[in-house]
Image (cartoon, helix red, strand yellow):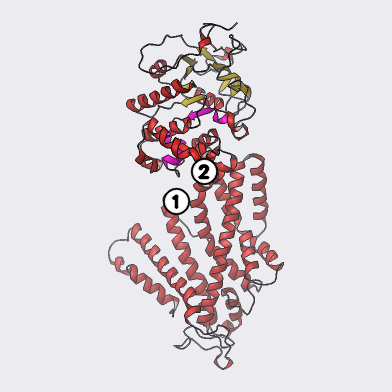
C-alpha cells in the first residue's frame, strides 16, 4: 500500500512544485516556500491518514504473524521494510504502531487542551485570589519533570492505551492553561466585557459567551501543536516499556525491540519506526505552524515539539 | 438655583428633600492607584428625567466617574445611589437589577462590541443574559428600526459595518433593557455630525418616552450644552495646579436656559420647579 516514506515525501514535493526548480533563479520568496511547506505537510498527512485508516480494512494480514524462518530479513519487494527478530512484517507493524500513536496523540492532546482551556479560562475570568492559587498550582506542576510525572501516572494502572492517554493528557495542560489565561486577561479588560456586565450577564455567561470563544482559536492551535509532542511522549513511554503493552505494536516499543539488532548491523528495524515517528509529527507541526502564521502573521512560527 | 439637585463636593444631601434622584454619587473617590485617585470626593446627583453633561479635558477622570456611575468600577470611597437604592457591590457583585438600571454607551464602538457576535445578537444580548431571550427577536427588530439599522445589517459582524452603524447597535444594546439612567461616555466622539445628530435624537426620543435620566460625558462643549439641561466642568488637572483643593473637584458650570427646539425635550418632573418642603 504505502511505499517508503522518503518516496512519499518526494512525491508530495513534486505534486506542489519541485524545490530545486526555483534554485536556478533568485532566492525563492517566502510565500512560495510557505505554500510548499503546507503542501508537503498536507500531502504527507493525507498519505499517513489513508494508510492508518485503510490498511487494517483492506489488508487482512496480521501484524502479530510470527514466521521464525523469515526473521531479520532486509527490505525486499515482499517485505518493503524488512522483518523483525520474529519474522513479523515491519511495514505492517509500523502502520499499526502509527495508528496507536496517532490515536494516543490526538486524544491526549484533546484531554490536555480541554483541561488547559478550562483551567486557564477560569483563572483568567475569576482573577484575584483564585487566579493566583491556580497559577501557583500550574507552577508546582511544571516544576516536576513531566516525563517523570507521566511515568508515575502510568505506573498506577495496568499497561494499556488509556493510561498512556491519561498520563500525557494530565501532564501537558500547563502550557495551554498559561496561554489561555493570558489571552483571557487581555480580553477581560475590553469595554465589551464591561458592556456585557452592564447588560446583566453573570460571570459564567461572560466566560462562556464572550471570553472562551475569543480564545478558542489560540486554544485549538495550542492543541494541534500538542499532538506531535504527545506522539513523541507516547513513544518515549513505550520505549521505556511503560506504555503500550509489549505485544501490541507501537512506534516506541518497535524502536526499543530493535535496539539489540542495531548492534548486529541490521539497520532497518530501527530506521523505519524512527522515520514513522519523525515524519508525521513534522507534517502536523508544519500544518499547525502555517495556521499560526495565518492567525498571527507578525510572529514567525517555530516548531513546538 | 435651589431647585437643582447638584451639589458641589462635601456639602452633603441634596437641598431639595422628598425627591428621589435617578442617580446620585456621594463623595466618590476613584482611580486606578489608591495613592493617586483620578477623581476625588465628587458629589453629583441627577434628577429623574434630567440630562447632565460632564465636560473636561481628557484624562481628568470623567470617564472613570461614568464607569463608577454604571457600577463598572469600584471607587475607593463614596456611594452610588440608583433610583434611591444604594449600590452594594460593583461589577458582577452588583445585583442584576441595579446593573441593568444603568445603560452604558462607550466611546469606541469597535472596542465595545464583541467581534464574534452579529449585530442582531449584539443588541439583544442583554435580553438573553437576563433570561428574556424569548423577547429577543421582537424587541431586537423594534430597536433596530428605532436606531436606524437596516434589517440586512443585523446579520453582519462588527468588522463588516461602519463605526456609525456599530455605535447605533451599541446604543440599541444599552436601551434594550429600558434603563432608568443612560450613561453616554463620549458616545459621539468618533462619529460624523449627521450620525451624531441621529444618535442624540434616538437618546432624546427614548428619554421623552421613558423619562430616563442622562449622564453625557464628553469634551464637545457645543454639543453637550445644546443637548443637556446642565453642564458640569471638571477643573483642569488638580493636585498640581490646585493643590489647595486636594485634587479634582466638580464645579458648577454657568446655568444656561435651553435654546431652540431642535431636540425633543424631556418634561421635567412636576416637582422640580416647586421645592417640596
Mark 2 and mark 1: Cα distance apart in space: 25 Å
Image side of residue B219 versus residue A205, left or right: left
Query: What residue is drawn where x is 33% and y is 58%?
Result: A29
Q: Which of marks 2 and 1 is nearer the N terminus?
A: 2
- Which residue was labeled with disc 1? A299
Q: Where is residue A300 in the image (x, y as percent from the top left)?
A: 44, 53
In the rendered view, tell whether residue A81 sits above or below residue B188: below
- Pick the front one: A49 or A268: A49
Residue situated in front as seen by the camera: B241 or A283: A283
Q: Is residue B108 magenta?
A: yes
Most distant residue in the left direction? A25
- Work out which quarter of the rendered image holds the N terminus of chain A and state it: bottom left
Look at the numbered disc 1 and give the secondary structure of its residue: loop
Task: Please tell me whether residue A61 belongs to the stretch shown in magenta.
Answer: no
User: Which corner quadrant of the image does residue A107 belong to?
Assistant: bottom right
- Residue receiving disc 2: A210
Left or right? Give the position of B24 relative to A152: left
Residue numbers of the magenta segment: B99-122
Q: Is mark 2 on a helix, strand or loop?
A: helix
Q: Nearer the viewer, residue B59 or B218?
A: B218
For the point 50% across and 13% down, the residue is B269
Comparing labels 2 and 1, the label whose residue is closer to the camera? 2
Badge 2 and badge 1 both on one subunit: yes
To which chain does the residue with label 2 belong? A
Amino acid at each position: 500500500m504505502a511505499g517508503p516514506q522518503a518516496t512519499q515525501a518526494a512525491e508530495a514535493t513534486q505534486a506542489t512544485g519541485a524545490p530545486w526548480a526555483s534554485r536556478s533563479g533568485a532566492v525563492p520568496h517566502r510565500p512560495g516556500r510557505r505554500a510548499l511547506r503546507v503542501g508537503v505537510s498536507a500531502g504527507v498527512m493525507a498519505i499517513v491518514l489513508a494508510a492508518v485508516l485503510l490498511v487494517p480494512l483492506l489488508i487482512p494480514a496480521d501484524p502479530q504473524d510470527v514466521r521464525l524462518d523469515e526473521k531479520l530479513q532486509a527490505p525486499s519487494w515482499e517485505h518493503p521494510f524488512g522483518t523483525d527478530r520474529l519474522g513479523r512484517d515491519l511495514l505492517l507493524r509500523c502502520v499499526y504502531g502509527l495508528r496507536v500513536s496517532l490515536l494516543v496523540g490526538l486524544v491526549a492532546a484533546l484531554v490536555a487542551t480541554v483541561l488547559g482551556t478550562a483551567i486557564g479560562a477560569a483563572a483568567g475570568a475569576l482573577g484575584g485570589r483564585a487566579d493566583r492559587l491556580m497559577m501557583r498550582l500550574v507552577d508546582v506542576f511544571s516544576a516536576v519533570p513531566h516525563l517523570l510525572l507521566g511515568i508515575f501516572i502510568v505506573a498506577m494502572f495496568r499497561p494499556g492505551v488509556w493510561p498512556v492517554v491519561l498520563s500525557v493528557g494530565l501532564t501537558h495542560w500547563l502550557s495551554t492553561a498559561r496561554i489561555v489565561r493570558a489571552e483571557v486577561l487581555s480580553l477581560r479588560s475590553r469595554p465589551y466585557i464591561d458592556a456585557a456586565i452592564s447588560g446583566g450577564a453573570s460571570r459564567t455567561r461572560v466566560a462562556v459567551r464572550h471570553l472562551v470563544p475569543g480564545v478558542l482559536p489560540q486554544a485549538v492551535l495550542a492543541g494541534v501543536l500538542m499532538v506531535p509532542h504527545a506522539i513523541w511522549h507516547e513513544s518515549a513511554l513505550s520505549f521505556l516499556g511503560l506504555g503500550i503493552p509489549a505485544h501490541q505494536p507501537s512506534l516506541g516499543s518497535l524502536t526499543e525491540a530493535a535496539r539489540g539488532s542495531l548492534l548486529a548491523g541490521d539497520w532497518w528495524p530501527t530506521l523505519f519506526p524512527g522515520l514513522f515517528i519523525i515524519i508525521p509529527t513534522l507534517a502536523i507541526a508544519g500544518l499547525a505552524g502555517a495556521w499560526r502564521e495565518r492567525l498571527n502573521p507578525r510572529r514567525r512560527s517555530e516548531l513546538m515539539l | 438655583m435651589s431647585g437643582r439637585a447638584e451639589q458641589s463636593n462635601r456639602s452633603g444631601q441634596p437641598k431639595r428633600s422628598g425627591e428621589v434622584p435617578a442617580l446620585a454619587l456621594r463623595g466618590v473617590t476613584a482611580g486606578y492607584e489608591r495613592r493617586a485617585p483620578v477623581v476625588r470626593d465628587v458629589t453629583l446627583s441627577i434628577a429623574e428625567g434630567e440630562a447632565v453633561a460632564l465636560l473636561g479635558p481628557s484624562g481628568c477622570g470623567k470617564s472613570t466617574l461614568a464607569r463608577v456611575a454604571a457600577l463598572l468600577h469600584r471607587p475607593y470611597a463614596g456611594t452610588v445611589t440608583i433610583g434611591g437604592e444604594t449600590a452594594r457591590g460593583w461589577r458582577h457583585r452588583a445585583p442584576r437589577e441595579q446593573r441593568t438600571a444603568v445603560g452604558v454607551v462607550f466611546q469606541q464602538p469597535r472596542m465595545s462590541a464583541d467581534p464574534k457576535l452579529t449585530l442582531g445578537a449584539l443588541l439583544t444580548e442583554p435580553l438573553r443574559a437576563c433570561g428574556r431571550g424569548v423577547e429577543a427577536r421582537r424587541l431586537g427588530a423594534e430597536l433596530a428600526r428605532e436606531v436606524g439599522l437596516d434589517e440586512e445589517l443585523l446579520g453582519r459582524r462588527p468588522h463588516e459595518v461602519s463605526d456609525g452603524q456599530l455605535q447605533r447597535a451599541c446604543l440599541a444594546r444599552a436601551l434594550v433593557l429600558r434603563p432608568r439612567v443612560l450613561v453616554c461616555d463620549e458616545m459621539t466622539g468618533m462619529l460624523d455630525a449627521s450620525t451624531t445628530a441621529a444618535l442624540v435624537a434616538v437618546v432624546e426620543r427614548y428619554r421623552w418616552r421613558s423619562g430616563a435620566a442622562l449622564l453625557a460625558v464628553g469634551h464637545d462643549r457645543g454639543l453637550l450644552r445644546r443637548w443637556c439641561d446642565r453642564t458640569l466642568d471638571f477643573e483642569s488637572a488638580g493636585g498640581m495646579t490646585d493643590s489647595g483643593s486636594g485634587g479634582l473637584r466638580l464645579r458648577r458650570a454657568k446655568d444656561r436656559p435651553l435654546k431652540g427646539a431642535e431636540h425633543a425635550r424631556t418634561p421635567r418632573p412636576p416637582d422640580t420647579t416647586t421645592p417640596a418642603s
